[in-house]
Structure formats: C-alpha cells, structure tokens
Amino acid sequence: MSATPSNASGNAATTPGCSPTDRTSRPPAGPLCAIHQPNLFARLSTLAKLYAADYWVVLNDVQFARRDYQQRARLGSLLDPQHRHWLTLPTHLPRGRPTLIKEARVVDPARSRRKLLLSLQQHYGTSPHWACLSEALQPLLDLMKDTESTAEVTEASTRLLLDLLGWRGRIVHSDTLPARTGRSERLADLAASMVATSYLCGTGGMRYLRPDPFAARGIGVLPFRTPTAGGAWSGAREISALWALMTHGPNSLSALLRGHQGAVSREWAASRP
C-alpha cells in the first residue's frame, strides 16, 4: 500500500517576510506524517503539528463536524488574546449530518468572502504585519470566487499560513489514498501511504488511537505536545494562529516553530530503534 504521493501540493511556498522560495524538493521517504482535517485558519497547536511534519494528509473524507474548527476559527484580539470572536464560514451540508468534509458547501460565497476579509481587517488591520497577510490572502479570496467547497477554502486558509512561515512539506488528500474504515486503521494506512516511519498524533488523538495498526506497519506513534509557555503560544489550542502571526510577525513565529520542529525531530530520532 505504500506509495509516493502523486498529488502533493505544488504551490510555491514563501519564506517569512513574504519572499518566494524554491519548493521543488520533496521530503525524503520515511518522514514524519501528520493527518488532520482542513481547518479555517488553524490554531497554532494544529499549525505547529503540521509544520513539524514532512507530509500533511488532509483528512477530507470523514464526516463534517459543525462544532469543530472545520468551518470556523476563534480570532484573538491584538490587544488581548483572551478577547475572542468567532469567524465562521457559513456551510451547507447537502446530505445532512452524514455529509463528508469534501462534500460541504459554502453558503453565498460572495457574501462569505466579503465578511471574511472585513473580519480579518477589523481584527488585524492595525498590525504592522497586516500588509504581509493581506498579500497572502489574495489567492484565498480569488479561490472563493471560483469554488463553493468549504474544504478547499479552509485548506487554503491553513496552507497560506504554512507558506508564510516557510514550511517545505507536502500536502496530500486522504480521498486519493487507500485506507480501511476503522479509525486507527485508517490513520495507519494513510501514514503508510506516505512511507512514514512515524505518525505525529495530537493530544486529542492519543485518547482514542490504538497503536497496534501502526505497529503492524512498522510506524511509530509520536505524541505531539504544544508548549505551555506564554508569548506566541498563548491560547495556542484555542485561537487561530493568525493572532500569533499578527502579534509576533512571520520571522519570529517561523523561528519559534522551527525550534519546536527541531525538538520534535530529536524526539523522533530518539524513539527509533
């Protein structure tokens, strides 16, 4: 079942500060793999997990959950991250509750596009880093003119954050990969398709994940923990990474995530036999 992904994202990444960089190189086989649903402007805890991985498998063929972060994000105020506001992408589920993430549709894309931009301007327009974000937002806003897919829009919103921070990994979609239906079995199969040696698992996943399917494929499960220190990590598991980006800037946030990525890599290396 292991295979080199053929649909990895080919979008050009950017280094911190909005400068273009080369993204033609592919991570080596046997890397760290993260699997996560597309989120609207992902929280810093999620973004850090994706940043630490060589591959992000976008989990788009599971049931849509309105109470999750798939179509909404908490925006923290520049002055006080404890002062928060929900940014929601109105979403229609064509098949009701059984609707898969990839089937969900944005309600009134033109109006949703205007509200998204206005909300971000209101929250972060006074940041010295707003110009950088504003430039990076344009492809997302253009995408919202061409698609009603909630998953495409939310994935793009997180991808632009990764690009701004210079992530050099690759993106693959779960609906293009073979996988069993069991929760842990599905994740193990998807990780195996990336020829992964380790699967990065967040604290929520560790509560239900069974290690046996991973062990059967020779894949280690590496718990991913978000630092609890303050600073940019304030509210990392609750608010969108936009707050940290607009407060500390791309350069500082990228350095922070690279440092945490290094710690994860060292833990990964130490866990290997």
Image (cartoon, helix red, strand yellow):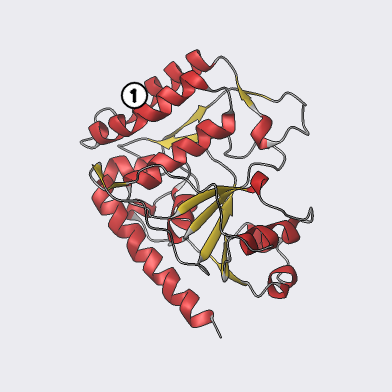
Q: Residue lying farthest bottom?
A: 273
- Where residue 89 appears, as percent x and y from the top left, is 54, 26
Q: Nearer the viewer, residue 248 or 7?
A: 7
Within 10 Å of disc 1 (Cα), the crowding (few <14, some 14-19, many 20+) is few
Residue 38 higher or lower than 123, as above or below: below
Residue 9 higher or lower than 78, as above or below: below
Residue 115 higher or lower than 197, as above or below: above
Residue wearing tag 1: 122
Q: Residue at x 40, y 71 (%)?
A: 263
Is 211 on the left or on the right of 75, as rendered?
Answer: right
Q: Quadrant of residue 266?
A: bottom left
- Where residue 256 appears, as percent x and y from the top left, is 32, 59
Locate the C terminus and report the quarter of the image it occupies.
Answer: bottom right
- Where residue 148 appears, as percent x and y from the top left, is 57, 22
Is 164 on the left or on the right of 128, as rendered?
Answer: right
Q: Residue at x 39, y 22 (%)?
A: 117
Residue 250 higher or lower than 265, as above or below: above
Q: Residue at x 73, y 55 (%)?
A: 179
Q: Is residue 262 visible?
A: yes
Q: Secondary structure at mark 1?
A: helix
Q: Quadrant of residue 91?
A: top right
Q: Nearer the viewer, residue 228 or 155?
A: 155
Q: Residue at x 65, y 57 (%)?
A: 190
- Where residue 226 appears, as percent x and y from the top left, is 47, 60
Please give the count of numbered marks on the rendered protein. 1
